[in-house]
Image (cartoon, helix red, strand yellow):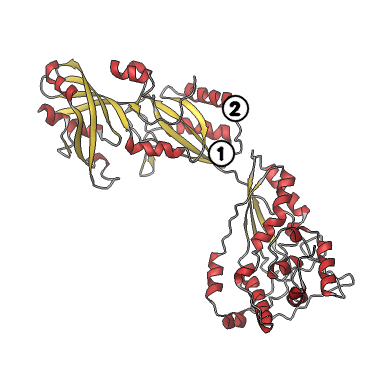
Amino acid sequence: MFPLTEENKHVAQLLFGTGTCPRCIFRFCGVDFHAPYKHSYEELLNDIQKFLKAEKDELILEVPNPPLKKIRLQELEDGIDNPSQNGENKISVIEDGSIASPNSNLNVNVCNVCLGILQEFCEKEFIKKVCQKVEASGFEFTNLVFSVSFPPQLSVREHAAWLLVKQEMGKQSLSLGRNDIVQLKEAYKWITYPLFSEELGVPIDGKSVFTRMAVMKALNKIKEEDFRKQFPCPPNSPKAVCTVLEIECAHGAVFVAGRYNKYSRNLPQTPWIIDGERKLESSVEELISDHLLTVFKAESFNFSSSGREDVDVRTLGNAQMLTPSTRFCFMTGCVLPGRPFAIELVNPHRVHFTSQEIKELQQKINKSSNKIQVRDLQLVSREAIGHMKEGEEEKTKTYSALIWTNKVIQKKDIEFLNDIKDLKIDQKTPLRVLHRRPLALRTRVIHSMETHYVDEHHFRLYLKTQAGTYIKEFVHGDFGRTRPNIGSLMNVTADILELDVESVDVDWPPALDD
């Protein structure tokens, strides 16, 4: 059914006579349902001519499907009339009522409002061209997000056409608000989404990105009389259709999570670079991510974890490294080995993996270096990563520290530490990190301690603490910046020789069967 009524005839005649395509006429007449926009060009042209009882036909184009991924449309610099001229260019109609467009194999009059976007860029030939680019990109995907950027000139032309229609409707005591016009992006989406979906065989996501805010803000502020002085109403007939400058394909990020153990005391978590100079050749991040980048064919990655250890601190979690009581807890499932991490893989070309392939990837990572091991490697959602971040400050961590004292000690001198529970300590930002972290006073809790006597000057201390506790400073006191500390509790000078992270109490990602 033809969507226009008798009350639309005057506006339709006005726009059609100035070179506006049928779909833009529908937009300005407030046709807000999809079906009429999807009709072929010939049908639309015949229907509008019958409706207007026009003597001459004018060829106009249709838009069945939107361009894929990201398409930037921009006018040719020399192909659009100068908007400041009060254009005298008339639509030249040849015998069959059409005019040849210099940028198209189709004979069309380029619409003076949409510049051919609801014409040539809705044709199946263009849809196929975009889909060929997508298929050639080599991405694996099961759905598609459509994003398009239109030239700001379109907003100005649409504003000019609206002022013309508004003025004419005002003569009939009718009104037309700016929001009464169907947006170009919406009409384009209605026409092209089904075509893209059919051509690629995947559903199209309804998201779209348009960056016309600056132009729209200016148009909302400018007075109508000032706009008319600077821009013709209706807009001039263009000399050429918009040109597609670029078709880009990109895939949404995928996320891989797991837990890692670090066995080296000479390996940073992330690349250690100072003043542009690399201090150590590798890092935990790189030993894991390099393999993922290759297999997922991704452009880049972002690494995150539940806290971080110093370069000289190991992250263990092996049962043989724990005390008897902690080992029991570990074996019954309340302590998981390793530190949780997540890696965002940006623009991956391959995204479909079986659980066996992920398991083989984990084995490959583990065989590549004796400095780290990875477990529970798995694909996760972006939302799931929030579970890891939630535990950074809320959960507990278990450590093992080898401590030296300046005074000779006996086993009885350290046993009292075993009885201390939920000890509150105040820690100022440590001197060693003060150059990169703000000065603050933080209260942390040492939930429990267990000692193991080694010799007259050494003992091993197992601690369960609140996340975010500076363990090294709790041992040596950091020149009195952490109180109380092991040195003050024992009335000795104490220092830490070795520190290991035994467990990070964050129940994520889910443990997998080996």
Q: Amino acid at mark 2?
A: Thr
Where disc 1 sits, the SS reads loop
Of the numbered discs 2 and 1, the one sitting upstream in the chain is 1
Viewer-nearest of discs 2 and 1: 2
Label of residue 354 in the image? 2
Residue closer to the observer: 151 or 387 = 387
Image quadrant where one finds the N terminus: bottom right
Q: Residues within 10 Å of mark 2 (few under 14, many from 20)?
A: few
Instruction: Please give the name of the residue rendered at 45% of the width and 23% of the height, measured from the top-left corner.
Output: 369
Residue closer to the observer: 117 or 194 = 194
Q: Is residue 482 above or below residue 66?
A: above
Q: Is residue 9 visible?
A: yes
Residue closer to the observer: 355 or 273 = 355
Q: Amino acid at mark 1?
A: Ala
Residue at which label 1 appears:
298
Left or right: residue 314 compared with residue 374 = left
Q: Is residue 171 above or below residue 330?
A: below
**Figure disc tally:** 2
Q: Is residue 153 visible?
A: no
Q: Position of residue 465 (x, y in %)?
A: 27, 31
Q: Position of residue 416 (x, y in %)?
A: 14, 22
Q: Is residue 67 above or below residue 473?
A: below
Instruction: Please give the name of the residue rendered at 63% of the width and 61% of the height, measured from the top-left corner.
Output: 150
Q: Is residue 145 above or below residue 505?
A: below
Residue 393 occupies quadrant? top left
